[in-house]
Image (spheres, rainbow, N blue to C red):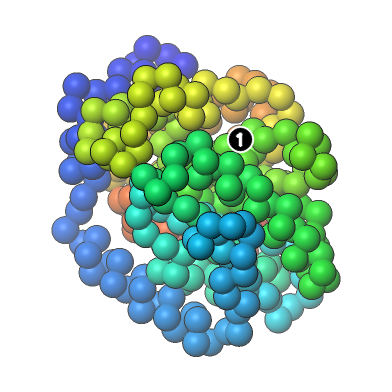
């Protein structure tokens, strides 16, 4: 990682770089539109909702099945700085993938400070085997899936990609590929923001929970996405993570969606699920 990227990710004003600088006037209306479209998606399909994958009440997932012959499964982890939000407002992403023959799984997870960030990530790791087993029982694959995640979900997606699945009794390719969207992969700067009121990270734990510093081993393909209107710190996070992936011999692409902010860039994913499905090897 270059000194320039390190400086961008660790600015003097972390609050501006990671919180206030990410806000745009249009986001309120956009999030309302996402919620309305997600409600319409829920009404238009017949998903299986809130299937448990762990003991915590938030350890649940939804499954949207494509009406077409099954070609793959995309699992999505929502945003919220590991301490807020829910899977429900992001259901609008499903139709584009369902139209490509790709099932979509939306995953909730426990939030900080109810659990530690380390426990949050471990809960999702433990859920992978449960989700894959459910898909297998339904005759919808069950050996592997692509994991996409937005913001905090992007961080979790990378953590799943770095997991030794064989040591957990699963196939090494349980996570076939990842699509991290506008994630934070070096968490140290967040200690200087109000986000740490709930994350409760000290220096050692911030380092330990930063996947940027632990990229090694056999890596699944990655497609990192970030918005062109996001702060330099957010763009640098994705650039550094992409660079680390390539340095360690992994296959990686970095896509900057011009004119898009932290939330509007999700339109790129929702607009053409078939294109993303093909990129991630979900379709033939």
Task: Please report the residue visible at 62 percent of the width from the left and 65 percent of the height from the top.
Answer: 52
Q: Is residue 126 left or right of residue 174?
A: left
Between 242 and 120, which is closer to the camera in this rendering?
A: 120
SS assignment at label 1: strand
Q: Position of residue 67 (x, y in %)?
A: 71, 81
Q: Quadrant of residue 216?
A: top right
Residue closest to the far bottom: 43
Residue 172 figure quarter: top right
Where is 207 relative to 33, above or below?
above
User: With 87 as the anchor, is 72 left or right in this view?
Assistant: right
Residue 279 appearing in the image:
no
Location of residue 236 in the rendering, given as x and y in whole percent from the top left corner: 38, 29
**Residue 13 visible in the displayed image:** yes
Question: Which sits in the foreground, 117 or 221?
Answer: 117
Q: Disc 1 marks which residue?
A: 252
Compared with residue 214, is residue 260 higher up or lower down, i.e. above or below? below
**Horizontal and vertical percent for residue 269?**
49, 59
Q: Quadrant of the C terminus?
A: bottom right
Q: Residue at x 36, y 49 (%)?
A: 83
**Residue beneath the point at 40% across and 69% down:** 89
Label count reads: 1
Residue 233, given in percent of the width and then of the height, sits at: 31, 31
Q: Is residue 34 left or right of residue 207?
A: left
Question: In this rendering, would 11 be left or right of 166?
Answer: left
| 62 lies above or below 255 | below
Circle 1 crowding by C-alpha within 10 Å: few under 14, some 14–19, many from 20: many
């Amino acid at each position: 990682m270059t000194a320039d990227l390190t400086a961008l990710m660790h600015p003097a004003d972390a609050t501006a770089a990671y919180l206030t600088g990410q806000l745009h006037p249009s986001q309120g209306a956009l999030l309302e539109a996402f919620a309305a479209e997600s409600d319409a998606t829920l009404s238009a399909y017949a998903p299986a909702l809130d299937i448990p994958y762990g003991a915590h009440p938030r350890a649940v997932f939804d499954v949207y099945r494509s009406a077409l012959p099954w070609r793959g499964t995309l699992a999505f982890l929502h945003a919220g700085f590991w301490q807020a939000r829910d899977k429900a407002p992001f259901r609008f992403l499903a139709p584009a993938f369902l139209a490509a023959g790709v099932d979509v799984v939306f995953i909730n997870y426990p939030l900080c400070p109810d659990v530690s960030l380390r426990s949050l990530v471990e809960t999702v790791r433990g859920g992978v085997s449960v989700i894959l087993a459910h898909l297998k029982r339904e005759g919808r694959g069950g050996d592997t899936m692509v994991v996409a995640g937005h913001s905090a979900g992007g961080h979790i997606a990378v953590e799943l990609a770095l997991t030794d699945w064989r040591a957990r009794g699963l196939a090494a390719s349980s996570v076939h590929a990842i699509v991290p969207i506008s994630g934070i992969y070096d968490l140290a700067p967040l200690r200087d923001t109000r986000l740490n009121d709930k994350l409760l990270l000290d220096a050692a734990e911030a380092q330990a929970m930063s996947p940027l510093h632990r990229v090694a081993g056999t890596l699944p393909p990655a497609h990192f996405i970030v918005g062109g209107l996001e702060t330099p710190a957010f763009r640098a996070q994705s650039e550094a993570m992409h660079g680390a992936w390539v340095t360690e011999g992994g296959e990686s692409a970095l896509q900057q969606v011009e004119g898009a902010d932290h939330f509007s860039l999700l339109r790129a994913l929702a607009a053409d699920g078939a294109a993303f499905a093909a990129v991630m090897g979900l379709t033939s």
